[in-house]
Image (cartoon, helix red, strand yellow):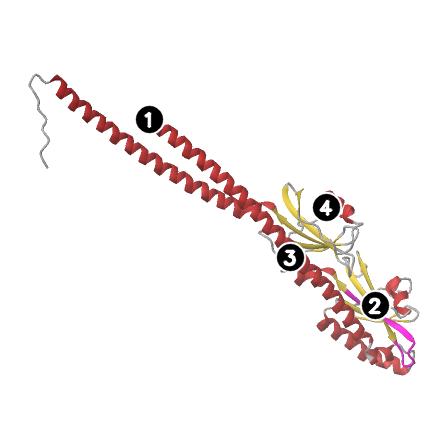
């Protein structure tokens, strides 16, 4: 009977350990997923704000460049204009060094590049066929994404502003070219989610524009599944964000959330490894299970000791009973008076 009781007790404790560990893991996993989702959405909102703010800042700085009087003079086809180009070139170089641009160029109303901060080949000297030039010549501030620039070979952001002469007419344009990896470097490098989670930027067509400097060459490359998600999202209102979704990418389970930036129409993506996100839940469940197993072992030891003590007591009672029953002499038991 005692042995059966002990076995039942140990079984009950063991089942309790399993139940407690399972409940703790499920609760902790749910809490970790909820916290990770909130963290990813918060990172996405900050990224959206930073991208929009940086685009506006680049546009403002391009306007400041276009208002330089020496650039207006440099567009004049005269001795004074040709003399002013040396000073204008120095101003453009200075803006590139301190203004965050990768490249600046000045073009006249015919589209001929008058000044550039980078050497240009002959076939690149006329930009009259480009939409940015035509829009700027109409007095409209222009922002354009070039997914593969002939100058840099990578994705660039181009902002163009009209340059007006002394008569107020548009005499040419200033085009500011910013490489996307330069544009997004500080923004993306600051986003870390676990060991391998981060943020990156895709064009409206799903082309990778920028990723963190710390990422490997194959990290955050869009695949067919992600592009399918983007296409499904394509008709949504710009700025509307999705809750994190679990996606199998590169043989790993990943959590992805993204939104379309209203200022640029780019897709901003935050991605994290599900294993990294749920690691705290697994550690807590393992710790809870370990503690429960130790408790079970202590209970088993205590019950074992109790079983041995009860067995010794039974043997003592049996010996005393046998002695009392089998003794040939009379045995009198007297209780002392208190």
Q: Check disc 3 and report the residue beneath it.
A: 42
Tell me whether the residue at label 1 lies in contact with that at label 3, contact meaning CB atoms closer than 8 angstroms: no
Please name which of the two marks, 4 or 3, marks the residue nearer to the observer.
Answer: 3
Give coordinates of residue 335: x percent, y percent.
10, 31
Please name which of the two marks, 2 or 4, marks the residue nearer to the observer.
Answer: 4
- Extreme front residue here? 337
Q: Check disc 4 and report the residue beneath it.
A: 226
Mark seen at residue 160: 2
User: In the figure, residue 190 lies in which quadrant?
Assistant: bottom right
Give coordinates of residue 291: x percent, y percent.
41, 42
Asked whether residue 103 is in view, the answer is: yes
Answer left or right for 78 relative to 69: right
- Extreme left residue here? 329
Give coordinates of residue 106: x percent, y percent.
84, 71
Label 1 to label 3, Cα distance in Å? 58 Å
Count numbered badges in the picture. Answer: 4
């Amino acid at each position: 009977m005692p042995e059966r009781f002990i076995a039942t007790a140990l079984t009950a404790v063991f089942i309790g350990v399993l139940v407690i560990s399972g409940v703790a893991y499920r609760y902790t996993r749910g809490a970790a997923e909820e916290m990770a989702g909130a963290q990813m959405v918060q990172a996405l909102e900050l990224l959206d704000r930073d991208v929009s703010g940086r685009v506006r800042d680049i546009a403002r700085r391009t306007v400041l460049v276009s208002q330089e009087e020496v650039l207006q003079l440099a567009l004049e086809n005269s001795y004074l204009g040709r003399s002013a180009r040396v000073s204008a070139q120095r101003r453009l170089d200075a803006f590139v060094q301190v203004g965050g641009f990768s490249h600046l160029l000045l073009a006249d109303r015919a589209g001929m590049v008058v000044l550039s901060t980078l050497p240009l080949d002959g076939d690149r000297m006329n930009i009259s066929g480009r939409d940015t030039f035509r829009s700027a010549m109409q007095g409209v501030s222009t922002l354009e994404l070039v997914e593969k620039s002939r100058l840099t070979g990578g994705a660039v952001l181009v902002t163009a502003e009209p340059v007006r002469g002394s008569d107020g007419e548009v005499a040419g344009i200033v085009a500011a070219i910013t490489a996307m990896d330069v544009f997004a470097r500080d923004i993306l490098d600051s986003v870390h989610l676990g060991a391998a989670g981060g943020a990156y930027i895709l064009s409206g067509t799903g082309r990778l524009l920028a990723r963190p400097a710390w990422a490997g060459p194959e990290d955050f490359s869009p695949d067919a599944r992600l592009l399918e998600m983007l296409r499904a999202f394509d008709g949504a209102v710009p700025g509307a964000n999705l809750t994190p979704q679990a996606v199998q990418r590169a043989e790993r389970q990943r959590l992805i959330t993204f939104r379309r930036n209203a200022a640029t129409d780019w897709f901003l993506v935050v991605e994290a490894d599900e294993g990294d996100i749920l690691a705290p839940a697994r550690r807590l469940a393992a710790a809870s299970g370990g503690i429960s197993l130790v408790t079970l072992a202590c209970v088993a030891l205590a019950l074992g000791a109790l079983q041995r003590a009860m067995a010794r007591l039974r043997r003592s009672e049996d010996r005393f009973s046998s002695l009392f029953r089998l003794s040939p002499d009379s045995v009198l038991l007297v209780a002392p008076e208190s």
